[in-house]
Amino acid sequence: MEKINERLLNWASILDDGTREQAERTATMPFIHPHLALMPDAHLGRGATVGSVIPTLRAIMPAAVGVDIGCGMAAVRTQFSADELRAQGSLAPLREAIERAIPLSAGHHNRKVVATAEPRIEELTTLADEAGFDPTGDKKGWELQLGTLGSGNHFIEVTVDEADQVWLFLHSGSRGVGNKIAQRHTSVARDACAGVDLPDKDLAYLTEDTDEFWTYIRELRWAQHYALLNREEMMDRVVRQTAEFVGTEVVEQERVNCHHNYTTQETHFGEEVWVSRKGAIDAAEGRAGLIPGSMGTASYVVTGKGEPQSLHSSPHGAGRAYSRTKARNTFTHEQLREAMAGIEFRDTDAFLDEIPAAYKDVDVVMADAADLVEVRHTLRQIVNVKGT
């Protein structure tokens, strides 16, 4: 851990100047308590640093939470061994079956609300009524996006742990409806801060003594739950497709589902604060968590150690080292193929900006996080599914 100043602690051994400066600006906000914590995967983000943990007293910054509210990971440990999967022959049919079962890419949705999604949609509709808002006003067709992946670094993977046991692993959030909710409340916060001298306009905030604050919290919580149920719906479909591929029902040994882009109330250093984890997971003592690497590298199933100075947090992944544009201008399709050797994936240069070399070395990130989490399982991909 590096103490940058009284209000900023850093666990990242790889930290560029722009990211450090952005975190320092956020840490100057007067309601930060007791300090902002930078995770090992920290990199430049909009408004606030991705890979930062931001505790605030009686205020919240919507842009610091981010637009993909509730983004996170889900994983299921199956009873299958890698050999049982490979005994079926090529893994391409499994990848293609998953791609048919789950709509991929930004804007894509289901053609209808399927049976497994119906109770989840009903639950979300009830929660929205209780929160006093209609999500249709933010995103028409939000019901049809439940059980869809999105694009960018969102993925679905079939992986194998150190004991050769098969895990199903995926990464997604609250899709279009969460994005629209975030954008709307970021705009409300900017209006509320008109005339306030901010170090960055994206650090506009709402305070607990306003209706706008609590409206945001209610809708934020709804979007976080949407993200969790979105992952559950997708995972159920991945489980089904895997069972059909092997010819045997999946017996789940364990299921983990955790956010890494969210806000919740917690007590730290004697104060109840709003903790916004923007690219970080809850690593309270004994808490199960998931830390993905990048396309073609390892991912981790972890248990939190409850480190107080990190605000019981840990990194959420490898963290970008190259912007998407810079990655596309730097790396080649052949380099992507080399990085994905031995992994069944859709071989297209559409994923060039997701090449492992565009990210920090996940082994370095995990070494930096040694005081924050204990690694229970190391997962290696054998099938990768992504949206463009």
Image: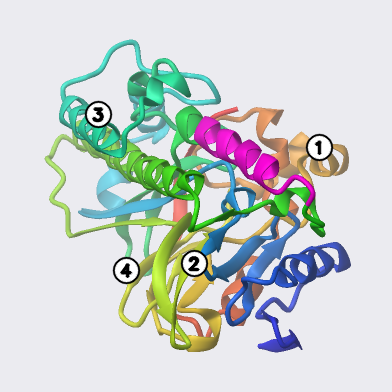
Separation (CA) of disc 1 from disc 4: 36 Å
The stretch drawn in magenta includes residue 383: no
CB-based contact (under 8 Å), mark 3 and mark 4:
no
Residue denoted by label 1:
328
Indicate which disc, 1 or 4, sits on the residue closer to the N terminus.
4
Closest to the observer, 281 or 376: 281
In what quadrant of the picture does the N terminus appear?
bottom right
> Which residue is farthest top?
111
**Whether residue 152 is visible:** no
In front: label 1 or label 3: 3
Identified at 59% across, 82% down, the residue is: 34
Please state which amino acid type lies under the numbered disc 2. Val
Indicate which disc, 2 or 4, sits on the residue closer to the N terminus.
4
Identified at 39% across, 34% down, the residue is: 90
Residue denoted by label 2:
275
Separation (CA) of disc 2 from disc 1: 34 Å
Say few, some or many: other residues with alpha carbon within 10 Å of mark 4 (under 14 / 14 to 19 / 20 or more).
Answer: few
